């Protein structure tokens, strides 16, 4: 009965757990009890999984007492992997009682001993990887304290299974935390100027000369600083805020730090200290002039200057870290003028990654963007697509939509990274981040194709200038690892400590332990390819580009109407079945139950208490013309009505849609009238 989602929840309310746990300690009932716990957590809700986590000591004791029982170990590890999904792997740090109940210092060695056992089953290996990955979110110290876990995760990046590789990569990245001040800003012009006056080392100077001194970021930054100061001094003399605003608008798209904090200073006679003064202007700090100048420009009521005024306000919001206000204004600005590149850059700074990637891709299509805007949009596209690729592939099942989207994001990030590295100045501060993303994604993309010494990433790059839009005279010969060293040297010359970002720390850990991890766990992770669909484990670039185009075409703003908000609980690991007796599954959430109702129209879709959870969503997926029919039918049947979602976003299982017979489609299409559509 534990396999039935509805009955399972009812049984849990009747103290089912208290009856199962004692059976784990008995030889003749251990397997049966652990199977019941595995099934309960497989589809169970958050409360059930958290409650089982609190009883983890019983499961840990079973693992410890029976080291030769691989079947019991498989069921126990599966149960724990499912349970910690809700109790440990949450955005907020979990309550200490859940972490303490797991007895991690004792549990991790037990799990890794079973993983190393030659007789370990494939479900045991997959769930052990899943369990270790969940722990890296909030139990990093416990994981780092046991090197075998770190090596197992790193070795899993060489697995033949793409899903396992990306899951392991995400886990290794989560093992490291970014310092609060990991973002580096070159906001000290005097330090940069002193570095340029001293001169660069020969090999760095050669890179600058080959690219073009006038086009390098350090040169553009210094020129922008000089022009910025000149504009402020002129404003001090002529008091012309309109002229100042136009001058600042010319500086903003040149460089990230063309506008920064500064001001006129004078010595306070009483204190003898230098203080910022307004000098008779309506602002003291120079950055505060941005909204004042924007207001002055708007008062002229010149339509061609509305974008300029918005850009000044947007820059002020970014300097003051008022990103939500910047995003709101940028959206309105894009509606007025969708061909202004700077607005798209602002949209990539928000917390909505999907929205940011869409705007980055659209912004890259604008031809008159400045080099800075073009390059920063590329770097943002790499970072966002890389994040989405890791998340999507981790959350997906092979062949579903998230799987296809994940591969599309992966292909997009790798392609944009190569273009960026071929086009961007050698001294740009974003280069190091892009190289890190390229290395990390390549590790997961290539997997076992890479050598254990990673010589492919250390070798010279072959003619990146052939990439679309890259300057023909720029042919870097350094490998990707060498580019990281060069980036650090530029940081040192400019007087800035290289940032130790989360990705940077993960890359160092991977490169340091990659060979030894592969030697120790390579024979184990090589078995993780036994998932059946071998051809799906290779990213097909043509298919990925098509999927990315489909995803980008779905370019809209949700305005809070996201159907993901009310999704029911799903299986924590859908690729594995824990019950040989298959029960009917809800067409909405996939949970199994013997008491599901069947659609009277198609006789295929099944649903629970609310018809809209199964039947309505499936019917809407059968024909594009049925959107109107279903909305009218909802109203007639008293069902909750909500705005119809595009077919691409409906949570319908592909195999359920395929089960609909041709006759059913014809029956529905021939009755394109809500009054004649049959509903249960």
Image (spheres, grey):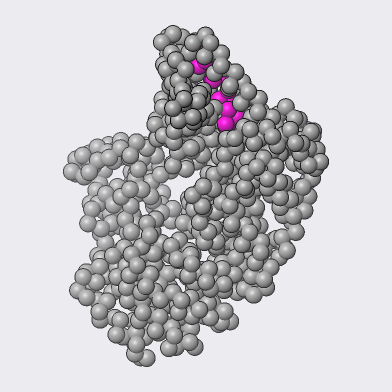
Residue in the foreground of this view, choosing between 406 and 308: 308
Q: Which residues are magenta?
A: 242-258
Question: What is the total number of numbered labels drawn onto the structure image?
Answer: 0
In the rendered image, residue 250 lying in the magenta stretch gets the answer: yes
> Which residue lies at the image location 39% right of the left edge and 55% below the top edge?
91
Can residue 215 be seen by looking at this rendering? yes
Give percent across and percent down for residue 508.
63, 59
Residue shown at 70% from the left, 32% from the top: 216
Instruction: Judge from the rendering whether residue 3 lies leftward or rightward of residue 507; answer left or right.
Output: left
Above-or-below relation of 584 to 419: below
Looking at this view, name the residue that lies furthest to the bottom: 27
Residue drawn at point x = 59 percent, y = 70 percent: 151
Residue 121 forms part of the magenta stretch: no
Q: Position of residue 272 (x, y in %)?
A: 49, 29
For this view, does 172 lie left or right of residue 669?
A: right
Residue 383, horizontal then vertical, whole percent:
56, 45
Look at 40% across and 76% down and name the residue there: 103
């Amino acid at each position: 009965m534990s396999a039935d989602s509805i009955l399972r929840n009812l049984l849990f309310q009747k103290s089912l757990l208290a009856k199962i746990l004692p059976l784990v300690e008995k030889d003749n009932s251990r397997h049966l009890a652990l199977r019941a716990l595995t099934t309960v957590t497989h589809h169970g809700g958050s409360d059930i999984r958290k409650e089982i986590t609190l009883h983890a000591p019983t499961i840990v004791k079973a693992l410890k007492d029976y080291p030769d029982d691989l079947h019991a170990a498989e069921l126990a590890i599966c149960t724990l992997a499912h349970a910690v999904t809700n109790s440990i792997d949450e955005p907020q740090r979990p309550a200490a009682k859940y972490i303490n109940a797991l007895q991690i210092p004792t549990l991790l060695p037990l799990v890794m001993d079973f993983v190393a056992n030659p007789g370990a089953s494939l479900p045991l290996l997959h769930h052990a990887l899943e369990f270790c990955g969940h722990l890296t979110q909030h139990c990093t110290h416990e994981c780092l304290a046991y090197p075998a876990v770190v090596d197992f995760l790193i070795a899993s990046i060489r697995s033949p299974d793409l899903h396992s590789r990306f899951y392991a990569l995400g886990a290794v990245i989560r093992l490291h935390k970014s310092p609060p001040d990991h973002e580096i800003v070159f906001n000290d012009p005097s330090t940069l100027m002193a570095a340029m006056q001293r001169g660069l080392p020969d090999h760095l100077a050669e890179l600058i000369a080959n690219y073009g001194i006038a086009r390098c970021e350090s040169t553009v930054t210094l020129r922008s600083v000089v022009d910025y100061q000149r504009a402020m001094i002129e404003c001090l003399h002529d008091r012309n805020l309109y002229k100042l605003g136009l001058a600042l608008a010319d500086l903003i798209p040149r460089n990230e730090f063309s506008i920064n904090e500064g001001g006129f200073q004078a010595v306070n006679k009483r204190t003898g200290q230098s203080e910022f003064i307004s000098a008779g202007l309506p602002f003291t700090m120079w950055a505060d002039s941005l909204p004042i100048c924007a207001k002055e420009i708007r008062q002229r009521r010149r339509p061609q200057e509305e974008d300029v005024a918005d850009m000044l306000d947007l820059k002020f919001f970014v300097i003051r870290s008022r990103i939500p206000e910047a995003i709101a204004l940028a959206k309105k600005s894009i509606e007025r003028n969708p061909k202004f590149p700077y607005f798209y850059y602002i949209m990539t700074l928000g917390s909505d990654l999907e929205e940011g990637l869409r705007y980055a891709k659209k912004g890259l299509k604008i031809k008159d963007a400045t080099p800075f805007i073009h390059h920063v949009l590329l770097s943002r596209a790499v970072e966002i697509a890389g994040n989405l690729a890791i998340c999507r592939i981790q959350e997906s099942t092979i062949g579903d939509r998230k799987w296809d989207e994940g591969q599309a994001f992966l292909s997009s990030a790798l392609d944009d990274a190569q273009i960026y590295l071929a086009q961007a100045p050698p001294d740009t501060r974003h280069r190091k981040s892009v190289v890190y993303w390229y290395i990390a994604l390549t590790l997961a993309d290539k997997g076992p194709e890479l050598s254990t010494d990673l010589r492919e990433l250390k070798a010279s790059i072959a003619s990146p200038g052939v990439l679309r839009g890259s300057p023909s005279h720029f042919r870097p010969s350094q490998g990707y690892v060498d580019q990281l060293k060069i980036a650090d040297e530029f940081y040192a010359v400019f007087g800035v400590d290289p940032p130790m970002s989360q990705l940077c720390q993960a890359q160092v850990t991977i490169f340091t332990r990659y060979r030894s991890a592969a030697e120790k766990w390579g024979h184990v992770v090589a078995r993780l390819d036994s998932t059946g669909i071998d051809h799906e484990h290779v990213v097909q670039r043509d298919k990925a580009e098509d999927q990315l185009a489909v995803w980008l075409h779905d370019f809209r703003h949700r305005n809070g109407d996201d159907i993901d908000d009310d999704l029911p609980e799903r299986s924590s690991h859908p690729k594995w079945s824990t019950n040989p007796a298959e029960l009917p599954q809800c067409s909405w959430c996939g949970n199994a139950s013997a008491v599901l109702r069947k659609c009277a129209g198609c006789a295929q879709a099944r649903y629970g208490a609310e018809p809209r959870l199964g039947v309505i969503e499936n019917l809407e997926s059968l024909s594009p013309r049925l959107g109107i029919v279903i909305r009218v039918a909802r109203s007639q049947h008293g069902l909750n009505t909500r705005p119809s979602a595009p077919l691409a976003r409906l949570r319908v299982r592909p195999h359920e849609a395929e089960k609909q017979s041709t006759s059913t489609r014809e029956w529905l299409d021939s009755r394109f009238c809500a009054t004649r559509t049959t509903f249960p």
